[in-house]
Amino acid sequence: MDEHQSHRRIAFSSIPSNTGARSPGDELMIWKTSDGGMGRVVADAQEEPRVALAVLDFHLLAGDPLHANALLLFKQLQPGNVVIAPTPAWRQLVAQTYSDALTVYRRDAFQTEQFDADKLRRFCQTLPGGFELRQVRLEEVTQFATDLDRALIYNFRSHEDFITRGVGMGILHQGRFVSGAAAAAVGRGKIEIEIQTHRGFRRRGLARAVAAALILYCLEHGIEACWDAANEPSAALARQLGFHSTGKYEAYRLKQPV
């Protein structure tokens, strides 16, 4: 299998497929790696690939699951990996290959045609006293990820890359970040939003405020904000912010050996 950094990328849209309709979140996930300069791609060939695997903080299968080389992609997977199988044929192959080693869960993809900017500004203004909402600076990226979660910056090559091509909004309280929203992935004028809030500071409107601030940044800079929910609280927050669901799809987590 050939491995390519995304600056020598394989355009996923050029990989032939006879596998049926894609999942709702598939187009967004494809541009993360094929256009966003993020992650890496493993494929069975560089010039005319038939199958490929995009590797970010999840693993996305692409191409023809009926091709003989499809099973070679699974050698790249490890227990604990999250796998997106974008078509029914890919899902069938994953289920057959890992029949007793999969946890299946459903995700919900969200988009919107238009936000209510005034409503978003009101969300930003509802912070309790003692909390500061602002854009994350380069010298704060390490603290931003440490205080909250590395998922906020995981897909970027460096802290400088995160600040240059991405963006983060954080809420500070007593010198530490207690909630944050970031561009988890970027490409083609779009970002996917990642939200993290410290367990002790949830249900205070912080996630809503920091997400609203990031969406306002997107509106001001001509960026399309996208959202992908792994659970109902995330989906409910997306709806509050003005997103609507474009459909659910399945994701898989490879189980750790017992």
Image: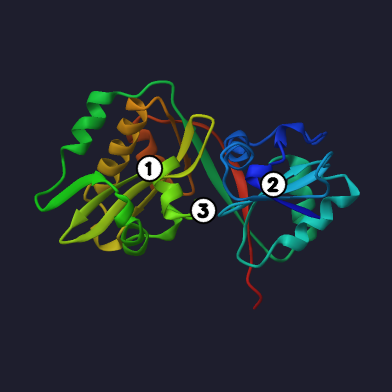
**What is the quadrant of the C terminus in the image?**
bottom right
Q: Quadrant of the N terminus?
A: bottom right
- Tag 1: residue type? Val
User: What residue is shown at x 51% (from left), y 51% (from top)?
Assistant: 155
Q: Residue at x 72, y 40 (%)?
A: 10
- Assign a secondary structure to mark 2: loop
Specify the quadrant of the image occupied by residue 167.
top left
Image quarter of residue 149: bottom left
For mark 1, give the secondary structure: loop
Q: Say whether residue 178 is left or right of residue 149.
A: left
Tell me the amino acid under the disc marked 3: Arg
Disc 1 from disc 2: Cα separation: 28 Å
x, y percent for residue 67 = 88, 45
Name the residue nearer the viewer: 171 or 251: 171
In front here: 67 or 153? 153
Disc number lying in front (1 or 2) = 1
Residue located beneath label 3 in the image: 157
- Where is residue 12? Give x, y as percent: 71, 37
Q: How many marks?
A: 3
Disc on res. 167: 1
Label 2 belongs to which residue?
85
Of circles 3 and 2, which is in front? 3
Q: Label 3 vs label 2: CA separation?
A: 25 Å
Label 2: how many Cα within 10 Å (few below 14, some 14–19, many 20+): many
- Mark 1 to mark 3 CA distance (whole Å): 14 Å
- What amino acid is found at the position of numbered circle 2 in the picture? Ala
